[in-house]
Image (cartoon, helix red, strand yellow):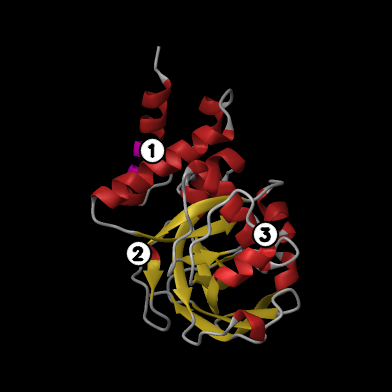
């Protein structure tokens, strides 16, 4: 009988192979039907540890499935989190090489950059806000190593919260200078307005997602570190994109950020 550690390792290896081969795999959830969600996080962490052994570095975290729009789109009812590594960050306006992703979708977000460490449990909104150095407009490219995005909560957690890429805007804004709850967002793809949203769609306010993250990862031994980027969740539904697309998110009070997908 296959033991727990072997099951986790096999699933992590299958996802790592999908990254390498750009070939999605079938959903994992069926073979882990009797396992808690903590097993999915073990699978994700095994991949992160492999990336670190290869020289990649954790540069932050993301909260996924934070808005009602995304939860409805994905058929889930709770947030999750994933790790952001250095290799996932791409420069604004610089073409992202074709073939970087398998089945990408893009989401506009507010990025928190931390000045002080945050570690739960027990982190309050006030403590989270005090730990933020500044905020930036951001685009997150989500991607799934699961075929046709046929994911439930177990599969997206195991797949590092469907993380793909991050593009940050270049104008830091102090948190006190913007009301994130009321900040509206327009998302354009190739000059066409494809969706709108607001910060209040993200757990009532993006800062609530930061609190949720700190208090969720703290008991797992994870501290949100100074300088790290935290993506709190999408302000709109995720929009499919492909080679040659140019995406611009404009967020009130923060300005705009542009992602260019190489042809």
Check whether the beta carbons of the residues at disc 1 and disc 3 lie within 8 A of each other.
no
State the CA–CA distance, disc 2 to disc 1. 20 Å
Provide the secondary structure element on which disc 3 rests. Answer: loop
Disc on res. 86: 2
Viewer-nearest residue: 11 or 208? 208
Q: Position of residue 56 (x, y in %)?
A: 29, 57
Asked if residue 62 lies in the magenta stretch, the reply is: no
State the CA–CA distance, disc 1 to disc 3. 34 Å
Question: What residue is disc 3 on?
Answer: 124
- Residue 111 lies, with reference to residue 211, above or below; the image says below
Quarter of the image for residue 210 reads bottom right
> What residue is rendered at 51% in x and 84% in y?
172
> What residue is rendered at 40% in x and 18% in y?
3
State the CA–CA distance, disc 2 to disc 3. 28 Å
Question: What residue is disc 1 on?
Answer: 12
Asked if residue 16 lies in the magenta stretch, the reply is: yes
> What residue is rendered at 48% in x and 62% in y?
117
- Residue 216 lies, with reference to residue 253, above or below; the image says above
Viewer-nearest residue: 224 or 148? 224
> What residue is rendered at 47% in x and 44% in y?
221
Q: Earlier in the sequence, mark 1 or mark 3?
A: 1
Within 10 Å of the Cα at label 1, are there few (<14), some (14-19), or many (20+) other Cα atoms? many
């Amino acid at each position: 009988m296959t033991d727990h550690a072997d099951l986790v390792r096999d699933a992590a290896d299958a996802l790592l192979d999908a990254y390498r081969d750009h070939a999605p795999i079938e959903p994992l959830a069926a073979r882990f039907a009797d396992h808690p969600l903590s097993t999915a996080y073990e699978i994700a962490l095994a991949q992160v540890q492999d990336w670190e052994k290869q020289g990649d570095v954790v540069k932050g975290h993301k909260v996924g499935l934070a808005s009602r729009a995304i939860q409805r789109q994905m058929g889930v009812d709770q947030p999750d989190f994933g790790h952001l590594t250095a290799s996932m960050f791409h420069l604004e306006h610089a073409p992202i090489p074709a073939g970087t992703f398998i089945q990408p979708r893009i989401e506009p977000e507010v990025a928190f950059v931390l000045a002080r460490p945050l570690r739960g449990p027990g982190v309050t909104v006030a403590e989270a806000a005090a730990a933020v150095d500044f905020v930036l407009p951001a685009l997150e490219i989500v991607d799934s190593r699961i075929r046709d995005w046929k994911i439930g909560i177990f599969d997206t957690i195991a797949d590092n919260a469907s993380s793909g890429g991050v593009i940050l805007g270049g104008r830091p804004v102090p948190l006190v200078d913007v009301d994130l709850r009321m900040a509206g967002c327009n998302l354009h793809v190739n000059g066409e307005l494809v969706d709108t949203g607001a910060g209040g769609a993200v757990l009532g306010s993006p800062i609530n997602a930061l609190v949720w993250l700190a208090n969720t990862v703290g008991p797992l031994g994870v501290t949100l570190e100074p300088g790290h980027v935290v993506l709190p969740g999408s302000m709109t539904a995720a929009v499919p994109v492909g080679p040659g697309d140019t995406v611009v998110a404009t967020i009130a009070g923060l300005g705009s950020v542009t992602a260019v997908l190489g042809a």
